[in-house]
Structures are given as structure tokens and as C-alpha cells.
Image (cartoon, grey):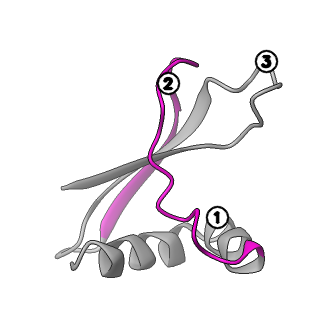
Amino acid sequence: MRTYQYRHYPPESTMFERCIGLAWCSGCRIYLGAMVYIPRARRLVDVLASLPADERARLLRKEMALIDHLDRHAGG
């Protein structure tokens, strides 16, 4: 089971601690996505930071494309 969490709101937002959490099985292609609480002080690794803005935005709009990208990035 793999997981990834990312911030959806900017730091100045009162909703900043509400994040998107994904969990999936690469083998069976079943995934779960949910809004999760991550404390403001906790730093999240942004594996999409090096991507061009348009590619990053495309992946964040499509959960399955994001999961496929994360699997390839992790060697899965």
C-alpha cells in the first residue's frame, strides 16, 4: 500500500491544514482519496515540485494520472 499527502490550500488560508490524502495498491489499482488533517508545522514532501506548472496542475486535477506518476517516480 502506498500513500501520498499534499496541501490543497495556500499557507495564508485558514484551510491550509486540510490536505488531500491518497492511498493505493499498485497491483490491484484500487485507491482511496480523502480530505485529511495535517498540522501546519508538518512539512510535506512535494514530489511534483520539479515539474512545469502546467504538468503539475494537470496531475493534481486527475487522481489516477497523479497515482500513475507517483508509481513511476517511485519505481512501481
- Residue 50 part of the magenta segment: yes
Q: Is residue 67 left or right of residue 23?
A: right
Amino acid type indicated by mark 3:
Thr
At which x and y percent is residue 51? Answer: 61, 75
Q: Earlier in the sequence, mark 2 or mark 3?
A: 3
The residue at the point 54 percent across, 65 percent down is 48
Residue 75's place in the image compared with 6, above or below, is: below
Instruction: Name the residue that disc number 3 marks.
Output: 14
> Which of the labelled discs sits on residue 38, or is there none?
2
Instruction: Name the residue that disc number 1 marks.
Output: 60
Res 74 quadrant in image: bottom left
Gap in angstroms between the C-alphas marked 2 and 3: 13 Å
Tell me the chief SS of the magenta region.
loop
Look at the image and tell me in which quarter the N terminus lies.
bottom left
At which x and y percent is residue 47? Answer: 46, 61
Amino acid type indicated by mark 2:
Ile
At which x and y percent is residue 7? Answer: 61, 41
Q: How crowded is mark 2: few (under 14 residues within 10 Å), some or many (20 or more)?
A: some
The residue at the point 39 percent across, 70 percent down is 70
Q: Of helix, strand and loop, which one carries label 3?
A: loop
Q: How crowded is mark 1: few (under 14 residues within 10 Å), some or many (20 or more)?
A: some
Q: Of helix, strand and loop, which one carries label 1?
A: helix
- Residue 73 part of the magenta segment: no
- Is residue 64 or residue 54 the one in the foreground? 54
Look at the image and tell me in which quarter the C terminus lies.
bottom left
Gap in angstroms between the C-alphas marked 1 and 3: 21 Å
Question: Which segment did they paint magenta?
Answer: 30-53
> Which of the labelled discs sits on residue 6, or is there none?
none
Whether the residues at callouts 1 and 3 have beta carbons within 8 Å, the answer is no
Gap in angstroms between the C-alphas marked 1 and 2: 18 Å
Residue found farthest to the front:
50
Q: Of helix, strand and loop, which one carries label 2?
A: loop
